[in-house]
Image (spheres, rainbow, N blue to C red):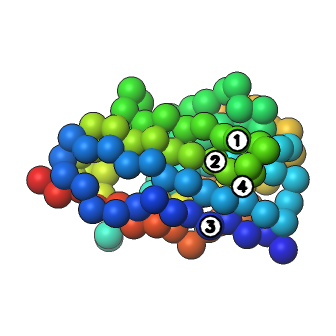
Amino acid sequence: QVQLVESGGGLVQTGGSLRLSCAASGFAFSATAMGWFRQAPGKEREFVAGISWHGTSTYYADSVKGRFTISRDNVKRTVYLQMNSLKPEDTAVYYCATHRRTLYSGSLFELNDMSYWGKGTEVTVSS
């Protein structure tokens, strides 16, 4: 079965960095676009970053553009989110998810475009 396991979250000060990982199994990872989303307390889950199946196309929410970088290693079956210059408003639970369309390289990463979700990893940025 599909499994997505996020790791790398934690407590960091404003301006700090974290690198999240999402280890994937149970599906054709190298043919699947992947996304990172986040959900802050009391707020809806929102898109953070997406990467095409081949890794050459990446997309970001305006709020993280220039600070976050999504990447993938198809050999290790892992997608990463490097987060720099963190702000208190980045505090949230971060989830990785699989895109429902195979071999997708477009920019649509809405919640209903995603099929499987991990359980999330918590990121807290202190001011």
Query: What SS does tag 4 mark?
Result: strand
Q: Which mark is residue 98?
A: 4
Q: Amino acid at mark 3?
A: Val
Q: Which mark is residue 101?
A: none
Question: What's the residue at 51%, 45% (across, down)?
Answer: 81
Figure check: 22 above or below 15: below
Q: Would you say 92 lies left or right of 47 here? A: left
Figure check: 33 above or below 121: above
Q: Amino acid at mark 1?
A: Asp
Q: Amino acid at mark 2?
A: Val
Residue at the disc numbered 1: 73
Query: What SS does tag 2 mark?
Result: strand
Disc nearer the start of the sequence (2/1): 1
Q: Position of residue 87 (x, y in %)?
A: 23, 46
In contact (CB < 8 Å): disc 3 and disc 2: no
In contact (CB < 8 Å): disc 2 and disc 1: yes
Q: Amino acid at mark 4?
A: Thr
> Which quadrant: the N terminus?
bottom right
